[in-house]
Image: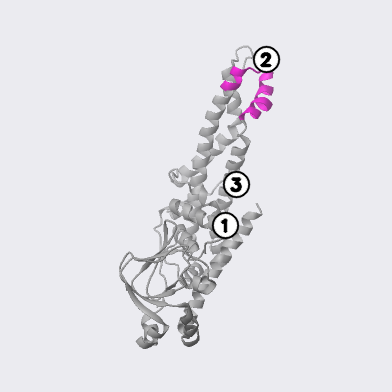
Amino acid sequence: MYCKFEPSEIKHIKEALNAPKTTSKKERIDWSVLKASIDSQKLVDYGFVVKKAPGTVLLKEGDTTKEMYLILDGEVTVTIGNTEIATIGVGEFFGEMSMVDGLPRSATITTSTECKLLEIAPKNFETIIKTEPSIAIKLLETVIKRFRAQNEILAEAIWHSRD
Amino acid sequence: MNKKDTSASSLIALFLESHFKEAVDIVEFENEFFAECEVAHCKDEYGKLKRFLTTATRHLRDVDESAFSQTFHKLYQDGFALSDFATKFAMKNTLVSQIYEKSFLNAAAAYEITHSRALEDSFSTMFVKTRNTTANDIAVAVNTKFYLIDRLLWFEASKSEKIKHFFSESSIDGHFDSPTLIKYYLKNTDTGQTQKEDRTQYLREILKIAR
């Protein structure tokens, strides 16, 4: 308190206040490359390609289903409670956490557009990991990113528990 | 003040002026700073972002330790000091009857004014009114200060190539701002455990505030 800021610092703060927000562009998996490596017959081996109308609830927070999905076309929204927290699209996975750890769904997933999805049953998961390294790597990246974020949250919880 | 001329109500007013002087001076100082920055008082409860901004700052500093200027660190520490003051202010001024008994009556004794029910009621009414007004002024200052911290944090973060790379690598899609990082944390927080649910609840709450 009673911290005096120099005119140059005030100018810097004003610049921050007036600056437009910049955007980060998400790097998504290049599905066209991935698709080329997986023929339609293989997709059927891994699961079912399903089409869903906009507004369809695919996963419900708290449910104990175990399927995992890969978005082939369209976009879905991720909601926790009543809060929409993300939109995910082509080339992205969802539902992999419950498939791996068996715990209830952590979020509700709803289609925001017409969607084409690869629904993967738990029994086919191992097959994919063994036979499709590009998908396995992408899946591993997703899990590691989530793990890193959880570490941040844990570090914050520890930090505040010291107060 | 002439002892004989001192009525109970003017004595209470005098006491309150002295008791809340530090807080009033701080609010005045902060308001001058906000005027210099040409920022309007923040109507949103940005002070609630304190925990998140601690995490975000540490997180982004881990990504790029040189991302933030001395001005940012100065503003950050100043904001947290102000927030601590607000907490202490609330704690210190909760028990009105104790302040009446231990502080006010001692001061009033010099003016030969002693306890009466009417005096205590009058003191309590004036104290609570002044305290609430001052507490509100402090809260507005805290919210505005944390709004400034938030804006400066993201202004500087958005200029860091390492942070841009981190956003890209982590598939964080959106503006370089708090709502985007809050959504990223929410997306990556599995629910099911009480501690995590508390955390998720907090993130949901501040997502409605941050802009």
Residue B129 lies left or right of residue B99; in this view the side is left
- The residue that mark 1 highlights is B194
Asked if the magenta segment contains residue B112, the reply would be yes
Q: Are marks 1 and 3 on the same chain?
A: yes
Q: Earlier in the sequence, mark 1 or mark 3?
A: 3
Whether residue B65 is visible: no
Q: Give the amino acid at mark 2.
A: Glu
Q: Is residue A56 above or below residue B44?
A: below
Residue topped by disc 3: B81
Q: Reading the chain from its start, which is encountered first: label 1 or label 2?
A: 2
Q: Is residue A70 left or right of residue A130?
A: left
Callout 3 secondary element: helix
Whether residue A60 appears in this view of the structure is yes
Residue A72 drawn at (x, y percent): 36, 77
Give the tally of numbered discs.
3
Give the residue type that dot 3 points to.
Ala
Q: Does residue B99 appear left or right of residue A119 in this picture?
A: right
Residue type pointed to by label 1? Thr
Chain of the residue displaying label 2: B
- Highlighted range, magenta: B96-122
> Which residue has dot 2 on it?
B112
Q: Viewer-nearest of labels 1 and 3? A: 1
For mark 3, does the 10 Å Cα neighbourhood hold few (<14), some (14 to 19), or many (20 or more) residues? some
**Image: B116 above or below B162:** above
**Which one is in front, B155 or A10?**
B155
Dot 1 and dot 2 residues touching (CB under 8 Å): no
C-alpha gap between disc 1 and disc 2: 57 Å
Would you call the spot at circle 2 few (<14 residues within 10 Å), some (14-19), or many (20 or more)?
few
Residue drawn at the location 46% of the way across and 83% of the way down: A134
